[in-house]
Amino acid sequence: MVQGVGFRPHVWRLARRHGVTGFVRNTSAGVVVEIEGPAHAVAAFRHALRLDLPPLARVTRVDSRAVPALGEASFRIERSVPSPGEYQPISPDAATCADCLRELFDPDDRRFRYPFLNCTNCGPRYTIIEDLPYDRARTTMRDFVMCGACAAEFDDPADRRFHAQPTACARCGPRLWLTDRTGQERDGDPIQLAAACLGAGEIVAVKSLGGFQLACDATNPEAVARLRRRKLRPAKPFAVMVRDLGVASMLCRLSAAEAAVLGGTARPIVVLGQRAEVPSPLAPEVAPNLRRLGVMLPYTPLHHLLLAAFDRPLVMTSGNVNDEPIAKDNVEALARLAPLADSFLLHDRPIRARYDDTVVQVIDAADRVVRGARGYSPTSIPVDGITGDGLALGAHLKNTFAVAKPGYVLVGPHIGDLSDPLSIAHQQEALATYLRLFRADPVEVACDLHPDYASTRLAEEWLDGTAPGREPVRVQHHHAHVASVMAEHGLRGPLIGVAFDGAGYGTDGTVWGGEFLICDEVDFRRAGHLAPVGLPGGDLCAREGWRMAAAYLTAAGLPTDPPPGLVGAGEGGEDARRWRLVCRLCSSALVPRTTSAGRLFDAVASLLGICHHSTFEGEAALRLEALATPADVAAVTPLRFELVEIGDTTVLEGPSLIRRLVAERSAGRSAVELAAAFHAGLADAVVDTCVRLRGASRFERVALSGGVFQNAVLLTRTSELLRDRGFEVYANRLVPANDGGISLGQALVAASRRAGGHRSTMEMSR
Ligand code: ZN
Ligand code: ZN
Ligand code: FE
């Protein structure tokens, strides 16, 4: 990654320091440096080049060879020459650097309090780029003509702003202003006005880097509650933005790894454990019933100014209703967000591409993406074996797409739920941009096996338009989850994949989600799974977890007494009637069946009286996780699963665990204890199953994926136990374990099938 990161001036400075001459030039494949000079100077230059890089540059390989000396007198920077059909990775958007931050708050600097300052080491990139190669004329900064002072810096190789394409100052650059919800501009300093609005409990829509955010005072319960009502979001946790690492560590316990991600150049939202020992200044409405909190630091000068003027934590959430795409243009925001926000902090630098805030959590000593977008995507992942351009259209919920190029997969930003036409429009817009920027001409298209996913239909339509008669490569959902781990870690050949999630279409047409696969990058065998139970109400069960309680009680052959707290108004009430109806449905032969691990969490949360209804995806599982600490899980007596062999498949008998859970609850064990015992039992069952599958074979590698493995307690415990038993354990880091990672897995499987002519190493291993 050597474009747009100040790489060439950096090389220029190194060459001057070491007294060598020659040139530096961008090429389609990277950067070429030609130098000549005394042998010791050449050696020192080469050493320094590998050691010392600009902050945003990434170098994966350095090749060198000797060429005849030309007697060059100086070192020069040559102009970039675009070559058709080629692309170069450039840095994603980066948070304001320390140098720019110093200028921002320095009254003597000419950019004092200028909300759009940036330099080669920081600032907007993909959010403003219209085309490559990356220069100002092909960004949304095109219409801002640099003043003399900015132009002089831009042209000076010794300056930090040499070729900083989006550079600007108050004289020549974008402008900030504050309006009411009708778009009427208000007089005064927009930052001070915004801070006053926030102080008065208002909700302010802030035009940020990749779209709008909604901000309010995170310590004001009424303000947060109002934002929840307006956003139609009763309980899903909000992220907060705090001024600096010091404030973050007052609210949350911070490991060194977490502090590094929080303060890094990508500046994602980091999910942290809240301090329990001190009362939190935050309103309880910010993250109800959860121990963990999403925190981010300011990442633009605008955020820094706002947090300096309003020195309290701010709720910072995407500028949208529910899961719609975030608003990005001023007119669009005033229309879509007027019912949500009281005032608008606007500017006139257009946002070219929508990028939500990225969400990351640190589990098992590694930072792992939960939602990838600003600062992360395009996530460029080196993948061996990809020889042509390809496209993978991902899953239905938490959709992402992936563009394959020889040697790489580029995973696009979080798109969201494709049931929403606005999300489909967002996907089409983002996909078109990626295909153009990366000069991709896909020869094959991959999608999920599910016939009704919108992404599957889009894949079919794509091929109808480009290669009529051709079929997309259909990849089973859980195979794609496991393949996403294989792609990230460069794993090939057969291994054990464990994919636990809410739902994915199985090869038998039923709903899978608690799967053990013996698989490689081409094919898989379903080697184990949770025992199927009823799914009374289909997709409705993900929101109404109490339905799964009925399904598991029925499957366990237990009396179908309603879980604690579910039936309010006595035996004759509506709740009781619905409960009895669903219980009857569970014993019917017509009810669909599922092996979903996510639905097992829903059942357990309901049976323990923790959560019967999820107002957002995974709420029941998150609240169950919040009750169990890793220490408790290690100490508790686990709730055991029975493992049953059926043919060459291992079945984890969920109902056997439910029988124990119900018995122990009746014996008086607390919900907190049982939540820990459930996590411990599930981790044990995963490990025991892997040990059986290993058998006499040589499958020492286990890949864990699927949204359920975003559960920090479960992933930590399972990984530890697997390592104790001699396994190598791999899990997602760069792409989400949830369905956001599916497109990467699809891209790998599609490319491998083409390369291997559908032959799998699995054939040999059977
Ligand atoms: Zn900077
Ligand atoms: Zn200027
Ligand atoms: Fe999934």
Image (cartoon, rainbow, N blue to C red):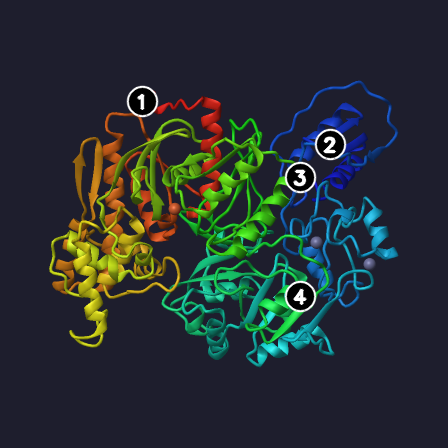
Locate the C terminus by quadrant.
top left
- Alpha carbon distance from label 4 to label 2: 37 Å
At x 25%, y 60%, the residue is 547
Specify the quadrant of the image occupied by residue 306. Answer: bottom right
At x 67%, y 49%, the residue is 125
Mark 1 or mark 4, which is nearer the start of the sequence? Answer: 4
Judge whether residue 137 can be spotted in this image: yes
Q: Amino acid at mark 1?
A: Ser
- Alpha carbon distance from label 2 to label 1: 45 Å
Mark 2 or mark 4, which is nearer the start of the sequence? Answer: 2
The residue furthest bottom is 200
User: Is 35 drawn above or below residue 141 in the view shown?
Assistant: above
At x 48%, y 60%, the residue is 323
Q: Which residue is mark 2?
A: 83
Judge whether residue 486 can be spotted in this image: no
Mark 3 or mark 1, which is nearer the start of the sequence? Answer: 3
User: Is 362 drawn above or below residue 689 in the view shown?
Assistant: below
* Disc 3 versus disc 4: nearer the observer: 4
Locate the N terminus by quadrant.
top right
For residue 113, side relative to residue 296 (left or right): right
Q: Which residue is mark 4?
A: 331
Specify the quadrant of the image occupied by residue 177. Answer: bottom right
For residue 572, side relative to residue 392 (left or right): left
- What percent of the width, then of the height, locates residue 421? 52, 55
Q: Nearer the viewer, residue 93 or 363?
A: 93
| SS state under label 2 | loop
- Alpha carbon distance from label 3 to label 4: 44 Å
Q: Which residue is mark 3?
A: 52
- Alpha carbon distance from label 1 to label 3: 46 Å
